[in-house]
Image (cartoon, helix red, strand yellow):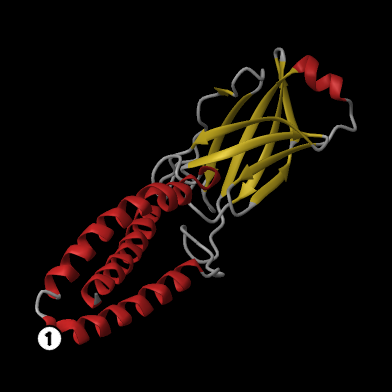
Amino acid sequence: MARILLTILGSLVSAAAFWAVAAFGSSAWLIRQPGGQREGSAGMAAAFVYGPMGALVGLALGGWVVWQLLAVSSRTGTVALCLLGGAITVVAGIVYGLSPTEYVREDFGPGVRPEFQVEVRFPEAEYDGLGAAARIVYQLRAVDETNETPGQLTRRTEGHTVVAGTFRIREFLRSKMFAVMVNGRQRVSWTLDVGMEPNPDPVWSEWQKMGDSGLEVRFRVVMPGRE
């Protein structure tokens, strides 16, 4: 009976340990992939896909190992103590890993805040129809925060009005949800695939159509001292 109970405990402890390793490890890897920062997709995939896959492996492997060890009855006490210590370690590790932290990423170096500049091209008739009191705000959205900056009229081109905005950033932008807000309501949201490098050149991207909204957007990153 003791062998069966300890085998079950060993399976559960191993499953929890493998879940933690698979979930936290895959999250750290996925968040660095294109699209990994979008709306918490890395965390969701880690917790509900890769974590459970690791747990299944740990459940089977842990149970098999403990069952084999307990084939010699004299090992029962030692195995039980090891499982107890393992359970405490796993629980403490998961609690620590899930605890909120105040860590602030500064990918460009301490105090270095590049400008992420965007320009949105509105149809001229639409912009004129908004009126002089219209308030245009741009947002960069992530699962943990939303950064906002006001849109400023910069120039008019044939058939279009260009409204610019500037964000101060601390982290490399790979894929980011960008939203255009007009008078407090969302006009459109679109995923910008930035693919930022550590020291990017201040070159404008090509104009990108934001779905079927009729708006177009382009962007660039300007490091301090570079223009």
Q: Is residue 95 left or right of residue 166?
A: left
Q: Give the percent coordinates (x, y) of residue 138.
A: 69, 39
Q: Looking at the image, which is closer to me, 190 or 155?
A: 190
Q: Looking at the image, which is closer to me, 108 or 91?
A: 91
Q: Give the percent coordinates (x, y) of residue 90.
A: 36, 73
Residue 202, compared with residue 124, is above or below; it is below
Residue assigned mark 1: 74
Q: Looking at the image, which is closer to me, 70 or 34?
A: 70
Q: Is residue 21 left or right of residue 130?
A: left
Residue 3, compared with residue 219, is above or below; it is below
Quadrant of residue 57 in the image? bottom left
Query: Does residue 187 appear in the picture of this structure?
Result: yes
Identified by mark 1, the residue type is Ser
Q: Give the percent coordinates (x, y) of residue 66.
A: 19, 71
Q: Looking at the image, which is closer to me, 226 or 192?
A: 192
Query: Does residue 227 appear in the picture of this structure?
Result: no
Residue 112, compared with residue 3, is above or below; it is above
Q: Quadrant of the C terminus?
A: top right
**Residue at 51% across, 66% down:** 110
**Residue at 66% across, 36% down:** 179
**Residue at 37% across, 63% down:** 20
